[in-house]
Amino acid sequence: QRLHTIFTLGQQLAAGRTSGLDGLETRLLREVKKAGFSDQQLAVLLLGEGDVKADELRVRARRKALGVLPVVKQIDTLAAEFPAKTNYLYTTYHGTENDLDRETAKSVVVLGSGVYRIGSSVEFDWCGVQAVQTAAAEGYKTIIINYNPETVSTDYDVSDRLYFEELSFERVMDILDFEQPGGVILSTGGQIPNNLATRLEQADAPILGTAAARIDEAENRHKFSRIMDELGIAQPRWKELTSLQAMQAFVQEVGYPVLIRPSYVLSGAAMNVVSNAFELEAFLQTAVQVSAEYPVVVSEFIQEAKEIELDAVADKGEIVSYAISEHVEFAGVHSGDATMYYPPQRVYVGTVRKLKIIAEKIARRYEISGPFNIQFLEKNGVIRVIECNIRASRSYPFVSKISGNNLIKKATQVLLGKPVARDESERVYDLPYVGVKAPQFSFTRLPGADPVLRVDMVSTGEVGCLGDTAEEALLKSMLSVGYKIPQKSVLISGGPILSKVALLSATELLVQKGYQIYATQGTHRFFAENGVPSSLLFWPSDAQEPNVLTYLKEKKLDLVINIPKNLSKGELDNDYQIRRTAVDSGVGLLTNARLAKAFIQAFCKLEMADLKIKSWNEYKAM
């Protein structure tokens, strides 16, 4: 019956398209809003599929002129036993009056990060809660808009008012119109609220921090790359996508592999590295479909480049605080899936100086006020910028905790116009301990998914661990996310020759420690040529014994290191079967040579008894 009602209302709206918005009756508008039609859906039904965003604003203006507005209601947490007096709120068209008046004291709205999913998790919720707590400490009434019951931010004890609502333009503007806050913080909730910046600013919402136009210049790959060229900041060579023919000419110039980067994407969605013309043509069509409204940039993919991140806070373009962290893996793994050191372990002082100079140029050019994150590549002393996110990043909680320097607190103070003292220097190398952030994956709960790290994010959580040394912190973090120290046998399928070379010294260390090394054909041959003993296991497609799949299913292997070689069908099929069977058999799997090498060095150097269990206060007192 309800579905039929919605269908009937939709037909009535479509039938009234000839009379447009002016002919829309108040009664019908109120009915369709009660039925759940959004302003955007009304725009399409009444005005056609033209400029939907502009038409949505016209629908909104007409709706407000007719007085069709949602009311604010309190969520009843007492099952109607007693009158509800909570600050747990929602908006609805099924009502005639508000349960409470707007907040009259100076207030600030913080947009949350939405539902937990691959790409957006508790890191952004921590940032939002820290922003709320800082604003409250500065004397502001705090209002959160979020819709995830799993978060801390949706605990109604955290803020003065909590709206359990979707993070859409329409709903956020409805709440802002009602509350009339002094400011709105978008930069602590990740990509979803950041994507609303331009539309909210155009609607005269009081956004705090960096201007929406500047955010767009950073999010839009083409605009960002052009600005980096203007500033004289090195970046991977790139070209805006216009046609497949032009793309092929560009690829001939820079060579494969290349990285396809659409704009405004969450966690690397629709990004990919392609290594031949067939893959380029196939993926290009997908990328354009995903982000047809924005240009697509194709850039050279620099192999074996170190990835470094800078998290910072700026005030009117001047950096007041920052932290630098280093990825264990080479570039090519999404930053959300990367294992990260803080402080950095293999970054020269001169490199740190260059990173800060580049960051200062970018902060001034974009007139940044608030949090931001820059990702760098470093190879052979040359530093290139990958991207800049003018918002808090996933690494903000990690570096804030490990350094003892709460970047979100400082960022929020900047957003509120409070004076923030500039750090004299960032203790890049002064900490007496090391922190490691390791990703948590859920491939066992995703049947059929390929458990391999690429430029798109696939992790579902993370762990942060401390140690007196980098090896101790890394080993603790790997054990914490479910890896086990192998007892006697390790399979290595080394993939590209560079990965085989990178794993050679670690494999020699395993042999010295008495481990039995198994290897697939190419890796077995490489080890033999370099004097490292190993036993051959045949590929799944060979149907010969001893076979990799047999050994995995019979639990004869304790750890699998499988490095993807290329995207040919034979390699893809065999590597996928090895990786998937390892996960399904409960065998530890590593698909990155740098991480595998670091893990091997850590567990060969340290025993379980060497892992010291200390409280956070003990580390802080060091």
Image (spheres, rainbow, N blue to C red):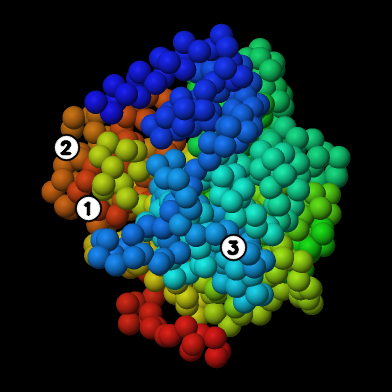
Pointer 2 residue: 545
Question: Residue 401 at what x, y percent from top left?
Answer: 55, 73
C-alpha distance separating marks 3 and 2: 73 Å
Within-10-Å neighbours for mark 2: few <14, some 14–19, many 20+: some
Viewer-nearest of labels 1 and 2? Answer: 1
Question: Residue 338 at what x, y percent from top left?
Answer: 50, 54
Q: Quadrant of residue 257?
A: top right
Hey, what amino acid is under mark 3? Glu
The residue at 44%/40% (across/down) is: 93
Question: Residue 586, which numbered label?
Answer: 1
Is residue 329 visible in the rendered image? The answer is no
601 sits left or right of 516 in the view: right
The residue at 25%/53% (across/down) is: 587
Closer to the chain start, of discs 3 and 2, is 3
As drawn, 248 above or below 36: above
Hey, what amino acid is under mark 1? Gly
Q: Quadrant of residue 395?
A: bottom right
Please tell me whether mark 2 sits on a helix, a strand or a loop.
loop
Please tell me whether mark 1 sits on a helix, a strand or a loop.
loop
C-alpha distance separating marks 1 and 2: 22 Å
